Amino acid sequence: MPAEPSPSSVRPSAGRVRHSGDDVLAAAVALLDRYGLADLTMRRLAAELDVRPSALYWHFANKQTLLAAVSDWITRDRPERDALLARVAERLPGWTGRLRAEAVWLRLALLEHRDGAEVVASTIALGLGHDVPERHLTLAAAAAGVPDDVARAAAQAMLHLVLGSTQHEQQRAQARALGVAVGDPAPVAHALADGALADVPEVADLPGDVAFGVDLLVDGLDARVSAAGADGAAGTRGTADAAEPGAGESWPARGEAAR
């Protein structure tokens, strides 16, 4: 992906000029914010840059490739994410705080751009773009000490929760802006981490149902970690004759924690 352009810095120049890939990407982000995904067409983008549509294909093979670059821009790493993770870690240290913070950051990044969740969701569905959001979520889950496949599954579940909920949130907001009466889901009175992060500004407007979903995923993973630890401890207390090789080391299958 091109090195971080500033979408607000690109303006059409008088006469036709040669634009860089950064220029095209920045103009695409600006058009997305102004008109939305449905109206972000290659023809409109070319007109914005005062070039022929064919000129855009020097930089992006097709529209989906361009949208993948826009998705990468939306979910890129930046200092604001590091600052949020640091604030959360002060109040909720360890992997449970980090996984929650990654979910909060992803939602904030998506909300910064009109139709941001839809752009990122469609890009991920097609296997395009970078994997920064999933990678951060996977690393956070892996810090719990779970096997790689469990960390990936937890990350994907969190990714789908945040993408889906944020897409609905943006769709409702845009409908209201157009004067369409939209019914909101029943409010859920829940605070992320049971209110432990209430003084973190980025968490303040997190909808209760999203906070509950994030907590449910994190707490559920934590419960499985605890169950695995308890099973491991029980295995080490067995006699040498009763214990099989590797007893107590396996990750509990679904439902084992409840037995």
Image: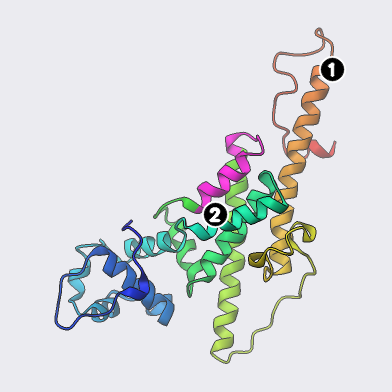
Can you tell which quarter of the image residue 204 is in? bottom right
Can you tell which quarter of the image residue 3 is in? bottom left
The answer to whether residue 75 is above or below residue 182 is above
The quadrant of the picture occupied by the C terminus is top right
How is the model colour-coded?
A: rainbow
CA separation in Å, label 2 and label 1: 43 Å
Q: From the top left corner, tell me how far across and down residue 184 is, in percent.
A: 69, 79
Q: What numbered label is drawn on residue 88?
A: none
State the extent of the magenta-drawn residues as a range: 133-149
The answer to whether residue 92 is above or below residue 200 is above
Q: Amino acid at mark 1?
A: Arg
Q: Nearer the viewer, residue 52 or 199?
A: 199
Q: Nearer the viewer, residue 200 or 240?
A: 200
Q: Secondary structure at mark 1?
A: helix
Q: What numbered label is drawn on residue 237?
A: 1
Q: Is residue 159 left or right of residue 236?
A: left
Q: Confirm whether the magenta stretch covers residue 226.
A: no
Q: Amino acid at mark 2?
A: Asp
Q: From the top left corner, tell me how far across and down residue 187 is, in percent.
A: 76, 74
